[in-house]
Amino acid sequence: MWQWEITEDAACDLEDIWDYVYSYSGDGDRADAVLDGLEALFDAICRNPYAHAIYQFPDGYLPAHEYRSANYGRYKAFYRTDEHRKIVLIYRVRHVASDFTRVAF
């Protein structure tokens, strides 16, 4: 069974998402529910890590690696797979309206 891990950047993204949802809604339970949904997405990715397409960045932007992406609500998780270790490594979690060319990978 595959497991997921998150990078330090992704952990910061999740903290920022929680803070944003809480500041917008004033509801900690709602912010928790968003993170629970994202963790459920990570679990689903682990059940079939190759189900999601490799993200196609705009012409002229070439990150160092290829990343797959999957959405939950208004958020997109970027990840890579490590077949040898059976790990899904979550690199970033960003709002779908973000300019992904300005995000460090």
Image: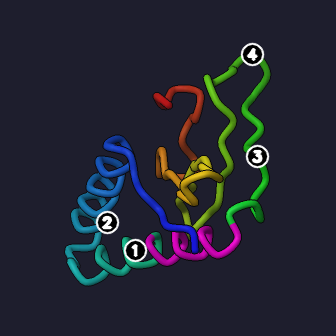
Mark 2 is surrounded, within 10 Å at the Cα level, by few (under 14), some (14 to 19) or many (20 or more) other residues, namely some
The Cα–Cα distance between marks 4 and 3, rounded to whole angstroms, is 17 Å
Quarter residue 41 falls in: bottom right
The residue under label 1 is 34
Sequence-earlier tag: 4 or 3: 3
Observer-side mark, 2 or 1, equals 1
- Colour treatment of the image: rainbow
Please, what secondary structure does the residue beneath circle 4 have? Answer: loop
Sequence-earlier tag: 2 or 3: 2
Q: Position of residue 38 (x, y in %)?
A: 46, 70
Q: Nearer the viewer, residue 39 or 60?
A: 39
Q: Are marks 2 and 1 in contact (CB under 8 Å)?
A: yes
Left or right: 20, with 67 as reference point: left
Mark 3 is surrounded, within 10 Å at the Cα level, by few (under 14), some (14 to 19) or many (20 or more) other residues, namely some
- Above or below residue 5? Residue 63 is above
Q: Are marks 4 and 1 in contact (CB under 8 Å)?
A: no
Q: Nearer the viewer, residue 104 or 97?
A: 104
The Cα–Cα distance between marks 4 and 1, rounded to whole angstroms, is 33 Å
Left or right: 37, with 13 as reference point: right
In the rendered image, residue 41 lying in the magenta stretch gets the answer yes
Observer-side mark, 4 or 3, equals 3
Q: Which residues are magenta?
A: 39-48
Name the kind of residue labelled 3 in the image.
Ile
Sequence-earlier tag: 4 or 1: 1
Q: Position of residue 62 (x, y in %)?
A: 69, 21
Label disc, if present, on residue 60 of the rendered structure: 4
Mark 4 is surrounded, within 10 Å at the Cα level, by few (under 14), some (14 to 19) or many (20 or more) other residues, namely few
Observer-side mark, 1 or 3, equals 3
The residue under label 3 is 54
Task: Kindly identify the residue that appears in the image at 54 percent across and 42 percent down.
Answer: 98
Please, what secondary structure does the residue beneath circle 2 have? Answer: helix
The residue under label 2 is 21
